[in-house]
Amino acid sequence: MQRGAPEPGPQEFDRVLSSMCTDPHPEARAAAERFLATNPGDPGTYETVAALERDAVDLLGSVAGLPDPSGYVTSGGTEANLQAIRIARNRARGRTDAPNAVVPESAHFSFTKAADVLGVELRRAPLSDRRADPAAVAELIDGDTVAVVGVAGSTEYGRVDPIPRLAALAEDAGALFHADAAWGGFALPFTDYDWDFGDAPVDTMTIDPHKLGQAPVPAGGLLTRSPDLLDELAVDAPYLDSPSQVSLTGTRSGAGVAGAVAAMEALWPEGYRAEYERAMALAEWLAAELRDRGVRVVDPTLPLVAADLAEGSVDRLRAAGWRLATTAAGELRVVVMPHVTRDALSSFLSDLDAL
Ligand code: 0PR
């Protein structure tokens, strides 16, 4: 086993098993470079990239089953999640001065930031078998609930919450329903899960091109079912040609927008389907290989494998140059992103065997 292996180059993904980012599609890379100095936050000046952003939203709508989508390209899932909760809070003005949002325990920590920034109470519902439990969510909903969140592809285990049941609970409570498909969104269209705008009354969704969408960073996505939801975010922008701005950040990355469009145009749907099938097969193969070694594995339901390695293994594999992440429970977490190959995983397993 190598010791003190050199740091991988900034664009090298050979030993990166921890990340939800990946090597961008070559066309996305080229498109990003062409738009490095543009700002979609100023559509009056940068018309071309503003038009591209409308294309990006339309493409995201196609992926997420929303024929006439509203939304914008965010800096990432964190901004999209925050903005969704902000829509929910603003929409409920006059109805409550103590708003709360009900999320499953598995919700990404970006909701903690959102709640803190927005002055919204975050209520975390316990899970059942690593997914949101509708009964537990229902118990936390009350007259001050402005949002209910479901995760479609959880950060730690790649689990998909029962989206239609959670959306129905939100609807009954007059709360907004937000689906966080930041990571899962570009894999789920090729599964049997009910997760998108066509499957349930989803109001808002996070779906990030810079994760499984194979776009360069930064390119997150916020989609809203209707324009009036997005309008909840509008503030007057007196210096700009456009009357108002909905994004949280002002100056934004034109490279992110152009890269997202190029990636989606190149890959939706067949390229993403092929990648999902490759990655899912690889995740199942890795799970089986680990089980053969007597390791307890959490069954992958999307291309993400969590496994209980022996104490100290993760640290030793990191010392051999592997970039690894762990779950809160301490399991190894391998995200089978497009850059993760069978060769890389075989070599990872050899290093594991050598411990
Ligand atoms: N929602 C979900 C379900 C996520 O998994 C993440 C990020 C977010 C929202 C937030 O998205 P942004 O990071 O784009 O704001 N989940 C990854 C994680 O926390 C983020 C990540 C990405 C971490 C790449 C490491 C890395 O190399 O694991």
Image (cartoon, helix red, strand yellow):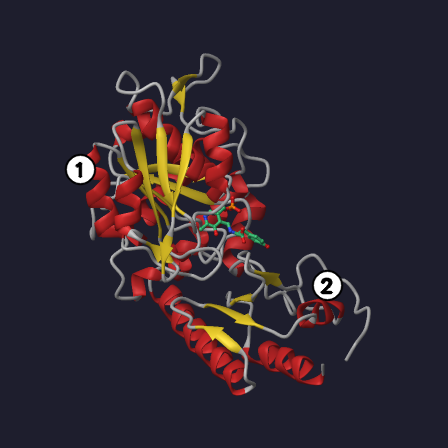
Give neighbour class at mark 2: few <14, some 14-19, many 20+ (Cα, 10 Å): some
Which residue matches tag 2?
8
Check residue 188 in the rendering and tell me which mark sits there, or answer none: none
Which residue matches tag 1?
172
Residue 92 x %, y %: 29, 23
Q: Residue at 44% x, 54% y: name it.
A: 183
Q: Residue at 64% x, 77% y: name it.
A: 348
Residue 73 x %, y %: 43, 39
Quadrant showing the N terminus = bottom right
Nearer-the-camera pick, 232 or 299? 299
Give neighbour class at mark 1: few <14, some 14-19, many 20+ (Cα, 10 Å): few
Which tag, 1 or 2, sits closer to the chain's start? 2
Rendered position, 306 above or below 179: below
Does label 1 point to a residue whose CB lies under 8 Å from ligand 1? no
Determine contact: label 1, label 2, CB under 8 Å.
no
Q: Which amino acid does label 1 sit on?
A: Asp
Q: For the view shown, which residue lies furthest in the top direction? A: 238
Rendered position, 351 above or below 312: below
Q: For the view shown, which residue lies furthest in the right direction? A: 4
Dot 2 falls on a residue whose secondary structure is loop
Nearer-the-camera pick, 129 or 36? 129
Q: Between marks 1 and 2, how big is the CA–CA gap?
A: 50 Å
Residue 207 x %, y %: 39, 48
| Res 42 seen here | no
Q: Which numbered disc, 1 or 2, marks the residue closer to the eye?
A: 1
Q: Would residue 326 be found to the left or right of residue 115 on screen? A: right
Dividing the picture into quadrants, the one containing residue 89 is top left
Q: Which amino acid does label 2 sit on?
A: Pro
Q: Residue at 54% x, 79% y: name it.
A: 295
Dividing the picture into quadrants, the one containing residue 246 is top left
Quadrant showing the C terminus = bottom right
Dot 1 falls on a residue whose secondary structure is helix
